[in-house]
Image: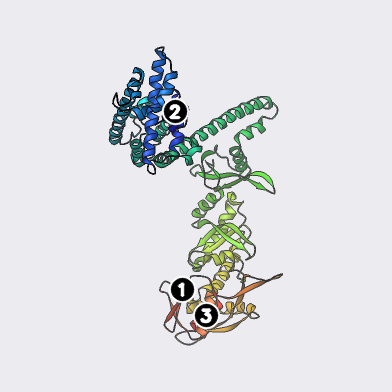
């Protein structure tokens, strides 16, 4: 057997050349597909390494190395023959016998070394970042002892089978020691075969993670260098310019914090605030600050600052809750409940989000005293002068958004309940709120109106109903359930809601859905003699038709054609 022919190189004592040749061959020869060929390759590799060691010793002793290049070509094939079998063998020089003996000893030694490694590997259970164990493995894998057996078939198979289980919990340090010990290259992954390829695939994730970390550290170092250079440049620029425009350069350094200080001073000139204390950066990109006012030092005021664009210009955008805190504070002082309500207004095609400071009243029967307190609060407290409009609603209705939004899409309800409480009189405010509440109850909670309320509100609402008489719909009469007395009459309108568009080849037409408010649906079904049952908590009603129960009251409006299934 010619070891150099098997390895595909010329005779050499350069171990690096021998190892590279062996690595290249292992990509072509798979131990499972060609075990005998792989065994010969491994033996040739071990013999070449031993030859290199022994040849260097001979050369250092002064002998000629030329003879070894020629005779070592068939050493493994000759190893083990008895002296005197052939005439050629009887004439071998002493050095050739010594080299054969060395190869035999080396093969046995490597087998013993492989057994030692496998015993050590069997006892290994992961270093858990033990520095002493890590140092031992680092020294061992870099040693000549392991390098001589790293391609041993049993060593390769054991590592390929077990390294992922041994190095669990992300112990990438050990995997990287094996990666370096085998001299793997990222670009050569597809060239490996068999157990060597499986081992490569097990080690590659650790290598890939290491490369990402290296790239991150390089980027961090680069950015750190750029940052330090930038800081130096800014410092130099500051020293040059600070004499001319110290305020401007100061604002540039402080950025959003200084802008927030100016913003609060301009918006609330009647009070002073503490220095903003930065807390965090929220998920929307706002930098969150806390600050305190001199007028109310017990409140932590929250302010959010973000860089945005207005009309194409880069500006700071601020959201702060001091005005809301003032509103809630004074509302409590006057026995009222105040809060901030966000809702979507506008039209179906052009919606808009609106935030209103909102006052809530609990009982329509006490609306006069509520209005007096609300008007008094806004006229006495100058700190509330920036609040131009206040939304007013009751917390006791099913659909408060109707009062705030001004109805449902494309249906004309009373004006949304927003008032300038500095200019409106308490009586006028009370009348507006009562009218809105009365209209709301007829349209959206008719099943909760009592006979007494019908008597009280009936005439006014009957007059109001006349405004809708030109719409599609019918008149309805409300009678006392006990006496049959006619309490009032009202018009039940239906309306068209834009539901989308029909698209043709060249034209697009609006598509409408016929709608009716849930309160008017109550009257509509009564006129058809439907069996209606009001929920015990007044949250809606149900209709039973042919054994099928349909619930109403979850939404403020109903598709008109859905009522066909209920009568």
Mark 2 surroundings: few (<14), some (14-19) or many (≥20) residues within 10 A: many
Task: Give the quarter of the image for residue 432.
Answer: bottom right
Residue 418 in view in this figure = yes
**Circle 2 SS class:** helix
Numbered circle sitting on residue 540: 1
Quadrant in which the N terminus is drawn: top left
**Circle 1 SS class:** loop
Residue 25 drawn at (x, y percent): 45, 36
Residue 250 drawn at (x, y percent): 63, 32
**Circle 3 SS class:** helix
Q: State the residue in front, 454 or 280.
A: 280
Q: Counting residues from the N terminus, which is met first, the one under dot 2 or under dot 1?
A: 2
In the depicted structure, whether residue 493 falls above or below residue 134? below
Residue 28 drawn at (x, y percent): 45, 39
Residue 150 in view in this figure = no
Task: Please give the residue where the numbered disc 3 appears in the rendered image.
Answer: 563
Mark 3 surroundings: few (<14), some (14-19) or many (≥20) residues within 10 A: some
Q: Label 2, label 1: how many angstroms apart (C-alpha)?
A: 88 Å
Q: State the residue in front, 72 or 465.
A: 72
Numbered circle sitting on residue 18: 2
């Amino acid at each position: 057997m010619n070891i150099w022919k098997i390895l595909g190189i010329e005779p050499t004592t350069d171990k690096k050349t021998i190892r590279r040749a062996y690595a290249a061959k292992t990509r072509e020869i798979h131990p499972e597909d060609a075990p005998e060929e792989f065994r010969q390759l491994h033996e040739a590799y071990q013999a070449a390494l031993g030859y290199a060691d022994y040849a260097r010793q001979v050369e250092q002793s002064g002998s000629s190395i030329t003879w070894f290049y020629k005779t070592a070509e068939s050493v493994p094939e000759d190893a083990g023959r008895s002296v005197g079998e052939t005439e050629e063998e009887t004439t071998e020089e002493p050095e050739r016998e010594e080299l054969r003996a060395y190869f035999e000893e080396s093969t046995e030694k490597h087998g013993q070394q492989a057994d030692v490694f496998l015993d050590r590997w069997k006892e290994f259970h992961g270093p858990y970042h033990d520095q002493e164990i890590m140092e031992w493995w680092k020294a061992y894998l870099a040693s000549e002892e392991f390098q001589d057996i790293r391609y041993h078939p049993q060593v390769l198979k054991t590592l390929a089978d077990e390294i992922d289980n041994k190095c669990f919990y992300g112990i990438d340090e050990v995997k990287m020691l094996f990666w370096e010990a085998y001299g793997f290259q990222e670009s050569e992954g597809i060239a490996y075969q068999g157990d060597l390829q499986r081992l490569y695939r097990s080690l590659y994730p650790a290598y890939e993670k290491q490369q990402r970390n290296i790239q991150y550290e390089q980027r961090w170092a680069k950015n750190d260098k750029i940052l330090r250079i930038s800081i130096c440049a800014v410092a130099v620029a500051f020293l040059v310019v600070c004499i001319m425009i110290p305020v401007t350069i100061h604002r540039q350094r402080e950025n959003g914090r200084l802008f927030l200080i100016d913003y609060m001073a301009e918006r609330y000139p009647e009070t002073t605030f503490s220095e903003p204390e930065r807390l965090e950066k929220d998920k929307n990109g706002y930098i969150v600050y806390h600050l305190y006012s001199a007028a109310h030092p017990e409140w932590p005021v929250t302010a959010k600052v973000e860089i945005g664009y207005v009309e194409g210009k880069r500006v700071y955008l601020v959201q702060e809750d001091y005005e809301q805190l003032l509103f809630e504070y004074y509302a409590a002082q006057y026995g009222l409940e105040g809060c901030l309500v966000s809702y979507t207004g506008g039209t179906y095609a052009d919606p808009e989000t609106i935030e209103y400071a909102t006052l809530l009243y609990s009982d329509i029967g006490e609306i006069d005293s509520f209005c007096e307190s609300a008007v008094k609060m806004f006229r006495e407290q100058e700190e509330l002068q920036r609040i131009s409009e206040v939304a007013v609603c009751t917390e006791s209705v099913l659909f408060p958004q109707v009062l705030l939004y001004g109805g449902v899409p494309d249906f004309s309800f009373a004006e949304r309940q927003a008032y300038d409480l500095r200019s409106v009189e308490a009586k006028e405010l009370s009348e507006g709120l009562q009218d809105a509440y009365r209209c709301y109850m007829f349209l959206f909670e008719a099943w909760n109106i009592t006979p007494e309320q019908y008597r009280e509100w009936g005439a006014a609402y009957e007059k109001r109903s006349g405004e809708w008489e030109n719409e599609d719909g019918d008149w309805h009469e409300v009678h006392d359930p006990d006496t049959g007395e006619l309490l009032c009459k009202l018009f039940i309108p239906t309306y068209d809601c834009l539901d989308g568009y029909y698209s043709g080849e060249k034209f697009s037409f609006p598509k409408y859905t016929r709608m009716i408010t849930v309160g008017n649906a109550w009257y509509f079904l009564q006129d058809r003699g439907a069996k209606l049952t009001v929920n015990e908590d007044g949250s809606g009603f149900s209709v039973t038709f042919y054994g099928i129960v349909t619930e109403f009251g979850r939404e403020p409006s109903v598709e008109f054609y859905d009522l066909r299934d209920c009568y």
